[in-house]
Image: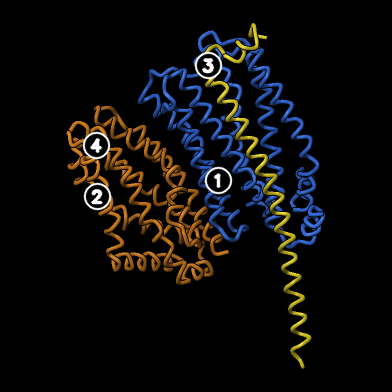
Amino acid sequence: MQFESFSSFLAMGGYAFYVWMSFAVTFGAMLLLAVGSYRQHKVLLKSVVAEQARQSRIKRARAKTADISPE
Amino acid sequence: MSALLIGIAQRDLRIAFQQKSELVQPLMFLLMVVTLFPLGVSPSPDTLQRIGPGVIWIAAILSSLLGLERLFRDDFNDGSLEQYTLSGVPLSAIAAVKVLVHWLVSFVPLLILSPLLALFLNLTLPMYIALLLTLLVGTPLLSLIGAIAVALTIGLQRGGVLLALLLIPVFIPLLIFATSAVDSAALQLPYYPQLAIIGAMLLLALALAPFAIAYSLKVSQN
Amino acid sequence: MWKWLHPYAKTENAYQLCLTLQPWLWVGALACLLIGSVWGLAFAPQDYQQGDSFRIIYIHVPSAILSMSTYVAMAVAALVGMVWQWRTAYMAMIAMAPVGAVMTFIALFTGAAWGKPMWGAWWVWDARLTSELILLFLYIGVIALYGTFEDKQQGGKAAGIMALVGVINVPIIHYSVEWWNTLHQGATISKFDNPSIAPEMLWPLLVNLLGFALFIAAVTTVRLRNEIIVREMHRPWVVKLAQKGEK
C-alpha cells in the first residue's frame, strides 16, 4: 500500500478531483454501454415477438376475408 | 472501351458547362468564406498572411464538399449509372474518368481564382507559388476520396451533412501538409518534402480509389 | 487453416458462440479491471514528477490503445466480410463501432482530466489528444453512415468501406498530427518523456489493458447478438428465441 491512511488514499496527493473523476466517468461510461446493450437486447426480443404477432394477425385476417369473399 | 470513356468525358463536360450555376456557386461560396476571415478575425496584413494558407485550404475543402454530390447524383437518378455498370467496361475506369472531369470543372476554376484569394490574404509571391503547387497536387486527392463517400451516400435521401461528416476527418492530413508547405515557403524554407508527401497520398489514392468508388457504387445500387 | 471459422459465418452459430463466450469474457474483464485499478490506484508507487495524478494512466493508456485497435479490428472485419461475403463479419464490425467510440471518448476525457493538473488547461492541442479526437470523428462517421441506411445489409457494406478508408488514414493522421504538433509547439512536455516505466508501475497497466480488451470483447458479443436479431428478425430460430425469452 502506497498510502498511510484511507483518507490520504482518497486525497490522492491533492489530485483527488481529477483522479476520481476520471475513474468515475470511465467506469460510468462503460457501465452505461453495457447496460444499454443489454436493454437493447430486451427491447429487440419484444419487438420480434410483436412483429410475429402482427404477421399472424394479418394472416388470420386474410384467411377470414378469403372465407367470406366467394359467397 | 476507350470510345465509351471519351464519350462519358465529353458528355459530362457538356452537362457541366450547361449547368453553369452549379459550377459557379461553390466558387462564390469559397470567395465569401475567405472574405469572412478578415472581417471576423482581423484585417491586419500580418495576421492575414499568417492564417492565409489555412483559410484558403479550409475554404477549398468546404466548397468542394458542396459540389461533390453532383459527381454521381444525376447519373444515379436517371439510371445511366446502371447502364454504365452493364456496359462491360470496368466501372472503376468509368469512375476514374468521371472524377477527372469533376476535378477539371470544379477545381481548375479554383486554381484560376487563387491569385485573387492570395491578394485578399496578403500572401507573398513565394507563398502563392507554394499554395498553387499544393492546390495542384492536393485537389485531385479531394476529388478522388470525396468520390468514394459520394458513391456510398448516393442512394440516401439525406446525404448532404453526412458527406461532410465522413470526409472532413479524412482530409485533415492533407490540410496539415498543404498549409505547412505554404508556411515553409513564407520562411524561405524548402517545402518539397510536404509536396512529396501530398504527392505520395495522391498516388496511393489514384491507385486504390477507382476500385473503392466502383465497389461503393455497386453497393449503392444493390 | 481457417476452415474452423467457416461455421460461424452462419448467424445462428455465431449467436451461440457469443452466448458461450460471454460469461467468461465478463468474469475476466471484471476481475482484471478490479485488480488492475486497485493495484494501480493504491499499490503502484507514486510518480516522482507527477505525484498521484499519474494514476489516470491506468485508464487513459488502455482506452487510448484499444480505441485504435478496435478501429483496426473493425476494418479487418469489414475486409473479411468483403472478401468472403460474410454478413456476420459486417455485423461484428457494426457491433464494435459504438464500443470503440466509447473507448475513444474515455481516452479523450481522461486525457483532459490529466492535462488540467499537468498542463494547466483542460484541452491542449497535443498530438495524441488531437489524433484521438480525429479518431472519434472517424467513428462518428461510420456510425452515422450506418444509421442513415434503411436497408441494414447495404448499410453494413457501406460502413465497412468507410472503415477501410479510415483505417488507411489512421496512420497518416497519426503521423501528420504528430509532425504538425512538433512544428507548432515543440516545447510542450510529453506525458511519456521517460519511456522506461518502472515494472511495478507497468504491471497494473498491463492488467488493466487486458481488462479493457476483455470488456470490449464482452460488450461486442452482446451487441453482435443484438445486431443478428435485428437483421434476422424473420428467421424461425430468432422467433423461437424471442418467444422463449418473453416467457
Q: Which mark is in front, 1 or 4?
A: 4
Q: Chain of mark 4?
A: B
Residue type (three-letter) at the residue carrying disc 2: Met
Contact? badges 3 and 1 (CB < 8 Å): no
Q: Which residue is mark 2?
A: B32
Contact? badges 2 and 1 (CB < 8 Å): no
Task: Count neighbours of disc 3 (C-alpha within 10 A) and say few if under 14, some if 14 to 19, many if 20 or more.
Answer: some
Q: CA distance from mark 3 to mark 4?
A: 38 Å
**The label number, if any, that marks residue C164 in the structure image:** 1
Which color has been applied to chain C in this rendered view?
A: blue
Residue type (three-letter) at the residue carrying disc 3: Tyr
Q: What residue is rendered at 35% in x and 47% in y?
A: B61
Contact? badges 3 and 2 (CB < 8 Å): no
Label 2 sits on a secondary structure element that is: helix
Against A19, residue A55 (above or below) is below
Q: CA distance from mark 3 to mark 2?
A: 48 Å
Label 3 sits on a secondary structure element that is: loop
Q: In this rendering, would B99 be left or right of C240? A: left
Q: What residue is rendered at 36% in x and 65% in y?
A: B12
Q: Which mark is in front, 2 or 1?
A: 2
Q: Which mark is in front, 3 or 1?
A: 3
Residue type (three-letter) at the residue carrying disc 4: Val
Against B219, residue C188 (above or below) is above
Q: What residue is rendered at 58% in x and 56% in y?
A: C155
Mark yes or no: residue B125 visible: no
Q: Chain of mark 3?
A: A
| Colouring chosen for the image of the structure | by chain
Q: Chain of mark 1?
A: C
Q: Which residue is mark 4?
A: B41
Viewer-side residue, B84 vs B73 = B73
Q: On the same chain: label 2 and label 1?
A: no
Q: CA distance from mark 1 to mark 4?
A: 38 Å
